[in-house]
C-alpha cells in the first residue's frame, strides 16, 4: 500500500513538472524575446500571439496542449476513477504556477484543452469550434477562452457527464486566471488581437 501511495505521489509530481514547462518563455527566448517583458507578460498563447505573431505562437499552443494531453495518456492507466480527475488538474496548475518562473505562468487554457482532449475528444472539438468562432467574431482571446470553457462545461452534461465536476473546476480556475481580462472587458479596456502572422 505504501509503495502504491508513493507511486501515485510520483505521478502527481511528474504531472506538475510536465505542466510547468514554460513553452511560451522557451519559444520566445528562441527568437530573442523575453515574453514576460512584452505585452501582458503572460507566457500563454494569447500573449505569444501578440508578441511573436500567430505562426510562432502556434508552437506554444500545440506544446501547451500536449502537456495536458500527455499527462492523461501517460498516467491514466495507473490511477482509479477518483484519482484521475485530481491528476488532470495538476498539469493545469503546473502551467499556472511554474516553479521555474517563480510561480508566474499562464492562464491554463491550452493545457486544460489538452486534458479534455485526452478524456473526451468530442468535448474538445466542441470547445475548439467555439473558440475559433468567438475569436473571429470578437478578436478577443479572453472572451473566446471563457466561452470555450463554459460551452465545454455545459456540453459535458450531455456528452460526458462523468467529466462535469472536473470541467466545472477547470472553468472556475480559468475564470480566476482571467480576472484582469474580465475587469478590462467590463470597463472596455480589453485589447483586440491583430491578425499578425
Image: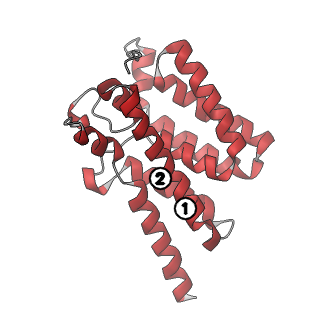
Q: Residue furthest right?
A: 158
Q: Quarter holding the C terminus?
A: top left
Residue 49 locus on image (x, y percent): 37, 27
Tags 1 and 2 touching, CB below 8 Å: no
Q: Eyeballing the image, is 112 above or below 75?
A: above
Question: Along the horizontal axis of the image, is 192 left or right of 156?
Answer: left
Q: Is residue 156 left or right of residue 177?
A: right
Image location of residue 188, percent across then percent down: 41, 11
In the figure, residue 78 lies in which quadrant?
A: bottom right
x and y, in percent, of residue 136 in the image: 54, 16
Q: Up-down: is 132 above or below 93? A: above
Q: Mark 1 against mark 2, which lies toward the viewer?
A: 2
Which of the pair 48/112 is nearer the observer? 48
N-terminal-most mark, 1 or 2 = 2
Along the line of sight, which residue is nearer the eye, 16 or 51? 51
- Residue identifier under label 2: 67
Residue 1 on image: x %, y %: 58, 88
User: Badge 2: few (under 14), some or many (20 or more) residues near its Cα, within 10 Å?
Assistant: many
Q: Which mark is residue 87?
A: 1
Q: Residues within 10 Å of mark 1 (few under 14, many from 20)?
A: many
* Residue 93 vertical position relative to residue 136 in the rendered view, above or below: below
Q: Residue at x 52, y 30 (%)?
A: 145
Which residue does the image show at 45% across and 24% down from the upper left? 182
The residue closer to the viewer here, 152 or 46, is 46
Q: CA distance from mark 1 to mark 2?
A: 13 Å
Query: Going 47% across and 24% down the picture, which residue do you hit?
Result: 141
Q: Residue at x 48, y 81 (%)?
A: 6
Q: Nearer the viewer, residue 88 or 26?
A: 26
Q: Quadrant of residue 146?
A: top right
Amino acid at each position: 500500500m505504501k509503495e502504491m501511495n508513493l507511486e501515485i505521489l510520483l505521478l502527481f509530481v511528474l504531472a506538475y513538472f510536465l505542466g510547468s514547462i514554460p513553452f511560451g518563455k522557451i519559444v520566445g527566448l528562441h527568437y530573442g524575446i523575453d515574453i514576460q517583458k512584452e505585452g501582458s507578460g503572460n507566457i500563454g498563447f494569447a500573449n505569444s500571439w501578440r508578441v511573436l505573431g500567430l505562426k510562432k505562437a502556434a508552437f506554444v499552443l500545440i506544446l501547451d496542449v500536449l502537456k495536458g494531453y500527455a499527462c492523461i495518456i501517460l498516467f491514466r492507466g495507473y490511477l482509479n476513477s477518483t484519482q484521475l480527475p485530481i491528476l488532470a488538474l495538476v498539469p493545469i496548475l503546473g502551467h499556472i504556477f511554474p516553479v521555474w518562473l517563480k510561480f508566474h505562468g499562464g492562464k491554463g487554457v491550452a493545457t486544460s484543452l489538452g486534458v479534455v482532449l485526452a478524456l473526451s475528444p468530442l468535448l474538445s472539438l466542441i470547445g475548439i469550434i467555439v473558440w475559433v468562432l468567438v475569436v473571429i467574431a470578437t478578436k478577443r482571446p479572453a472572451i473566446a477562452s471563457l466561452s470555450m470553457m463554459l460551452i465545454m462545461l455545459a456540453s459535458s452534461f450531455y456528452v460526458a457527464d462523468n467529466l462535469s465536476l472536473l470541467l466545472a473546476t477547470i472553468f472556475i480556475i480559468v475564470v480566476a486566471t482571467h480576472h484582469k481580462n474580465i475587469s478590462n472587458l467590463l470597463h472596455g479596456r480589453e485589447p483586440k488581437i491583430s491578425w499578425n502572422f
